[in-house]
Image: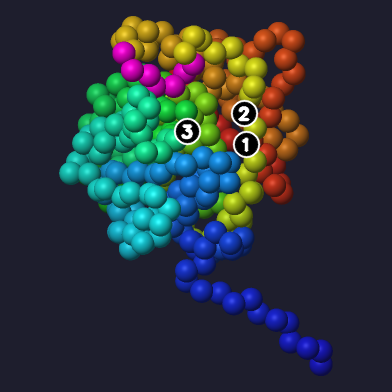
Amino acid sequence: MGEPFPLRHVALEDKYNLSQGPVFLNGAQAVARMLLMQRERDRRAGLNTAGFISGYRGSPLGGLDQNFARMKKLLDKANIRFEPGLNEDLAATAVWGTQQAEMRGEGKYDGVFSMWYGKGPGVDRCGDVFRHANLAGTSKYGGVLALMGDDHTAESSTTAHQSEFHFLDLMVPILNPAGVQEILDYGLYGYAMSRFTGAWTALKCVKDNIESTASVDGSIDRVTIIVPDDFAFPPGGLNIRPRDGFLEQEARLHEFKRAAQPCPSSAPTTSTISSPPGVPCRRSASSPPARAILIRGRPSRISALTR
């Protein structure tokens, strides 16, 4: 008989060890790893960013806060702060505030990438905050992901809920991952899109993904994001700014932010974004199509739904 096949050493801590490529984790752990990956990707890009997490527990995201609490040392080391909300809308307001951290040049970091989480009824009660925060915008090196925990069949909720329609009304793009791997991929893509478009980005989370486990590729460089360099930005860009008029915010959302969301076009190995009806990408006429996101390995498709 030949030599036995060598076994790779595996530890429970591997799921958060960014030097490990293949990892075994569940959806909630993938959310946490994705935040660590975002911080490390920023560091490699020469950015001094921090992270902020706040929300309110509720199925299927009921164990997310416990997971964050258990990994406090790892989060602290990565400059990521977890602050559970007293309720959903106070948590969302805190997330909105993080996008203003460096707005007047007084911030400690280049930007703060933030995450809100809550279940469907929590999305309902946050309508006022979400609308104002999305109109105000995100910071250039910050960005916001809003995790909507949807329980379509009311297995552990008082109502069956589906939150896409709420975010469509707010004109917030929606990413709908089909598995644990895509929670990692779409999360990173969502932050890039939030920074580029100046809008919040929603990430749909159902129990089939959050409560599932899988072996995934957790490599830092798995996702390569290429943002367009020829988008026709309005004066002052798309990101949050001080002394911004309410009607100016609304005009920017309708005329430019929505156009920025479907701007990247498809390529053979490039995930694509679906364009809302009647909203063309604002690119110069002579510009070639730009690729938005490349995922090493098999082609993947990303759908960003906008109204």
Q: Position of residue 3 (x, y in %)?
A: 78, 88
Q: Which residue is mark 1?
A: 225
Q: Position of residue 77 (x, y in %)?
A: 40, 57
- Residue at image x 64%, y 13%? 283
User: Secondary structure under badge 3?
Assistant: loop
Q: Is residue 63 magenta?
A: no
- Position of residue 216 relative to residue 187, above or below, is below
The mark nearer the N terminus, 2 or 3, is 3
- Residue at image x 55%, y 10%? 278
Q: Is residue 188 left or right of residue 28?
A: right
Q: Label 1 sits on what residue type?
A: Ile
Instruction: Give the alpha-carbon distance from disc 2 to disc 3, as whole Å.
Output: 13 Å
Q: Position of residue 280 (x, y in %)?
A: 59, 12
- Residue at image x 70%, y 42%? 299
The residue range painted magenta reads 237-243
Q: Is residue 128 left or right of residue 148?
A: left
Q: Is residue 142 left or right of residue 122?
A: right
Q: Nearer the viewer, residue 25 or 145?
A: 145
- Give yes or no for contact between labels 1 and 2 (Cβ–Cβ under 8 Å): yes
Q: Which residue is mark 3?
A: 141
